[in-house]
Image (cartoon, rainbow, N blue to C red):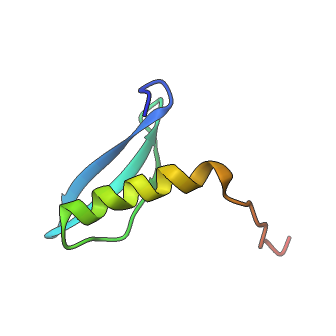
Amino acid sequence: MDAMWGRFEVVEVGGEYRWQLRDAQGELVARSQGYIWKSAAIEAIEMVRSVAAGAEVVDLATD
């Protein structure tokens, strides 16, 4: 991912690996569930990267 758009980070929290996505200003945009293996967290990043651009937006708000 180009640094001007943001970055994925893999972190270890409480013995689990998580990915988090930060925007270009360093603000946290998203954080994953915990994974037992670091490789699983990295695979999840690749899955998100491959499907996010085409994902549908569904408004479930009741306002």
Q: In which quarter of the image is residue 27?
A: top left
Q: In x, y percent, where is residue 52?
A: 58, 53
Q: Horizontal placement of 56 versus 11: left or right? A: right
Report which quarter residue 31 is drawn in.
bottom left
Q: In which quarter of the image is residue 18?
A: bottom left
Which residue of the protein is positioned furthest toward the left in this rendering? 15
User: Which residue is located at x 42 percent, y 34 percent?
Assistant: 1
Quadrant including the C terminus: bottom right
* Residue 39 position within the rendered picture, expressed as x and y whole percent measured from the top left: 22, 61
Count of marks placed on residues: 0
Q: Which residue lies furthest to the right in this view?
A: 63
57 over 21 or under it: above or below: below
Q: Nearer the viewer, residue 5 or 40?
A: 40
Q: Name the outermost residue toward the top.
A: 4
In-image side of 52 versus 20 (left or right): right
Residue 53 % position (x, y): 63, 48
Q: Residue 30: x and y, percent?
A: 47, 55
Say which residue appears at 38% left-offset and 61% top-offset: 44
Residue at 31% in and 46% down: 9
Which residue does the image show at 46% across and 30% down from the upper left? 25
On screen, residue 7 versus residue 54, left or right, reads left
Query: Could you say which is closer to the camera, residue 4 or residue 42?
Result: 42
Q: Nearer the viewer, residue 52 or 33?
A: 52
Asked if residue 46 is positioned above or below residue 13 in the image, the reply reads above
